[in-house]
Image (spheres, rainbow, N blue to C red):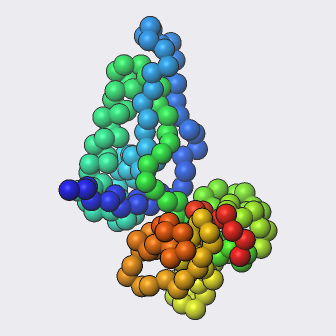
Amino acid sequence: MSPRPIRIRKVSKPPVVSGFKPFGNKNTEKNKSVFLHYEEYEALRLCDYEMLNHHQAAVLMDVSRPTLTRIYSRARQKIAEALVDGKSIIIEGGKIYFDSDWYMCENCGCNFNHPVKTEEIKFCPLCKSNKITNIELGEEYDENYKPRCDDICICPECGYEQPHQPGRPCKNEICPQCNNRMVRKGTPHSRKFNY
């Protein structure tokens, strides 16, 4: 039986530093680090810095309260390990998305966010096009405004295309020309072909 997929956690903004190193470390073992995931950092920030209770923090991170409690407990355990054993702390990784502005590339239809709000977004991260627009997924969001590749399956080997069948993942479709698995058009796996 496969494990349940992890729900992506929402982080308000990235941390201002990427880690910490111990000062005056008398530990003879070098290069030992503790990796604190972004969602663990966010749980610590909300519960210990913002002084929110677990229910309030769970709502902000878009997870259940028990999940928030497990994330928070892991974060505190890692911080304690770093302090007691004199290890450095590196903040990276995890299944997260940043609560930031969202953009859409008019060239390839890619939707992406930009976590560093002070920097100007210049190009699409997939196709490097500079034809990007800021989209707000609020009440004014137009349902007809979707990426143009949203309903097409494509073979990454030969380029064969067919309409996407709702409810059936493209990866379960087999190309009738070369017998390879198909992918959704517009994804990084299908970038071999120019549309």
Question: Residue placed farthest to the left in the image?
Answer: 1
Q: Quadrant of residue 86?
A: top left
In the displayed structure, 34 sits above or below 121; it is: above
Q: Quadrant of the C terminus?
A: bottom right
Between 59 and 91, the one lying in front of the other is 91
Q: Quadrant of residue 67?
A: bottom left
Residue 80 in the image: state x and y as whole percent. Answer: 33, 29
Q: Can I make out residue 49 in this image?
A: no
Q: Quadrant of residue 119?
A: bottom right
Q: Can I make out residue 48 in this image?
A: yes
Q: Which residue shows up at 25% across the image and 55% down it? A: 3
In the displayed structure, 162 sits above or below 75; it is: below
Residue 85 in the image: state x and y as whole percent. Answer: 36, 19
Drawn side of residue 181 relative to residue 115, left or right: left
Drawn side of residue 136 relative to residue 105, left or right: left
In the displayed structure, 186 sits above or below 19; it is: below
Residue 75 in the image: state x and y as whole percent. Answer: 35, 40
Q: Quadrant of the N terminus?
A: bottom left
Residue 31 in the image: state x and y as whole percent. Answer: 50, 19
Between 39 and 106, the one lying in front of the other is 106
Q: Which residue shows up at 26% across the image and 48% down it? A: 70
Q: Which residue shows up at 54% across the image and 69% down it? A: 178
Q: Which residue shows up at 54% across the image and 83% down it? A: 162
Q: How many marks?
A: 0
